[in-house]
Image (cartoon, rainbow, N blue to C red):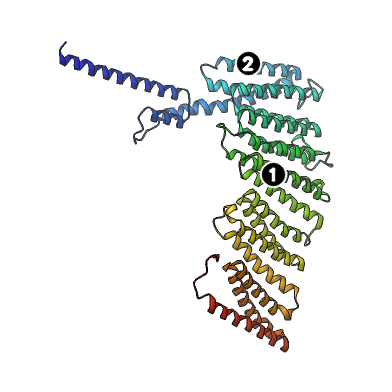
Amino acid sequence: MSQTESAGAQEFGRISERLAFLEERLSALEEKVSSGSRQQSFMNTIENAGFSGGETVSVDTTTIESNILEYGLSWVGIVVLMFGIGFLMMFIQKLAGSYISSLIGYTAVAGVYILSRYLKNSHEHLAYMLNIGTHLLLYYVTMRLFFFSSPQVIPFREAVVLLLLIAIGFQLYRSTLLKSELVAAIGIFLILATSVFSDMTHESLILNALAALVSLFLFYRYGWWRQMIFSIITVYLSHIIWLMGNPLMGHPVGGVQSPQFNLAYLFCYGVIFSLAPLVKQDERFKANVYTSSVIVNGIFFFLTLMLEVLLFYMKTYSGIFAGVFIACLAYSIFLKFRTQRVFDPAFYAIFSFLALSAAVYGYTGLPGAYFFLSLQSVLVVSWALWFRSQFIVVVNTILFVSMLLVYMVSGTYLDTVNFTFAISAFLTARLINWQKMRLELKTENFRTIYLVCLFFTFAFALYKAVPSQYVTPAWTGAAILYFILSLVLKNRKYRWMAIFMLLVTAVYLFVVDLAHMEAGYRVIAFLFLAIVLFGTSLYFTKFLRKKKAPGVEE
């Protein structure tokens, strides 16, 4: 063989290897497309095959059409099939009775199941949808053995409920074999549907608790968090349906006349779903799943509890919220030491303090409750320091300002409450400033908000506490106090508060005191304010023109 022929053979060999490599890649692409994978998986496969070098890849519209036909129509088809068999059973029941109708129903269940097994290898998704239809049909046919059927095939409600639970248990078992979160979520929904159909208080509420337990177990065992979020919402909604008198079963809205110890079941749901943050995180779900579950559980628990209070516990809710406060606060401490996440314990701490606020309001009423609620702000910020939670500080600031505004517009004031608001604002500002690095607060906004609250609440407290002729001297004294605090604490903000207080005092003196104050008090007020203004001016002239001393906060 000549050298030229040898080189040609080598080149032909390389071309053959390259063609074989490309054929292998194309086969992989075809397999991905035929298996019905998502578009993103398809794009990733293309990139891995070496065709993603900045080129635009167009997706064949035939593939999109195929997905719609295969997936979309199968969903519509299973719904139509369900309704068709249901109408067939009702038609046969009118003609031949309930027994024949049930027999036809179970025959349809067997037929759909056999069809799903037959199509398992050739049409995987359609077989999957038929499998879901099998479980739904089995539940429907079994449910009609007693419910919505006359005459009843089995005249014992408890026996039919037990059969329904067996059918649901089989569905949940199949969901674990199929690794299908959707099938599991449908199973939990059917438990809650059984709760509604049973229409018996303790039986219904026990089934709600069972659904919550099953949902938590599936999250713990398989990491199925979507079904858990779905279950949290639907379990509380099922409880609300019971509180409304179960109108889905034809009862009038508000038909429940007594609590029947249902509050114990509500707390049971809350405890079960609160265990979700204890499930160890792995690659099955992200950390924000804990945040979502905690928030959703807290919101729906609170809404359901408020409905409970409005219906049954308007005179005794203080004890209920006190119990929530103790439980949530203890659990927040447990989560702080048990987990490394910050939000979960912080949320339960905030929830506990909200419950404490409701309990305080129930015990004392307004306006007396403002005294304790304003002091609670200091407690909450102290808790935030321990938890290193900026979230608690943010929420507490919003609640404190909102409560102060409500109090100011209420028109009913107490001197003790007025001064307590000022003291709480001052202490909270000092705590935030003292441990701002511990809280990782990057700005002065929070402390500034509390200082603004201090400025107005202290001025208002003095205005309401002292006789009208002493308001000017009292506000001047407050300005002096702010100057002293600026020197002791080496903080410029208090110095600005003193300046603004002097300006407000001067305006008040000329606008109000000149018209109403007696001559003697007027002379004293003017002289006292003038002395303070001159003294302040001299102080600034002598000391503050120099360079600011080290250690002074801005």
In this view, the residue in front, 547 or 105, is 547
Residue 48, can we see it?
A: yes
* Above or below, comparing residue 384 to residue 15 in the picture: below
Instruction: Describe residue 200's horizontal placement relative to residue 539 as left or right.
Output: right
Instruction: Describe residue 365's horizontal placement relative to residue 352 as left or right.
Output: right
Which residue is tagged 2?
111
* Above or below, comparing residue 427 to residue 55 in the picture: below
- Residue drawn at x 72%, y 79% is 470
* Above or below, comparing residue 356 to residue 265 in the picture: below
- The mark found on residue 86 in the picture is none
Q: Position of residue 191 (x, y in %)?
A: 71, 29
Instruction: Describe residue 397's horizontal placement relative to residue 252 as left or right.
Output: left
Tell me the SS state at disc 1: helix
- Residue drawn at x 65%, y 47% is 346
Q: Amino acid at mark 2?
A: Gly
Looking at marks 2 and 1 on the same chain, the residue that comes earlier in the sequence is marked by 2
Tell me the SS state at disc 2: helix
Which residue is tagged 1?
333
- Residue drawn at x 70%, y 64% is 423
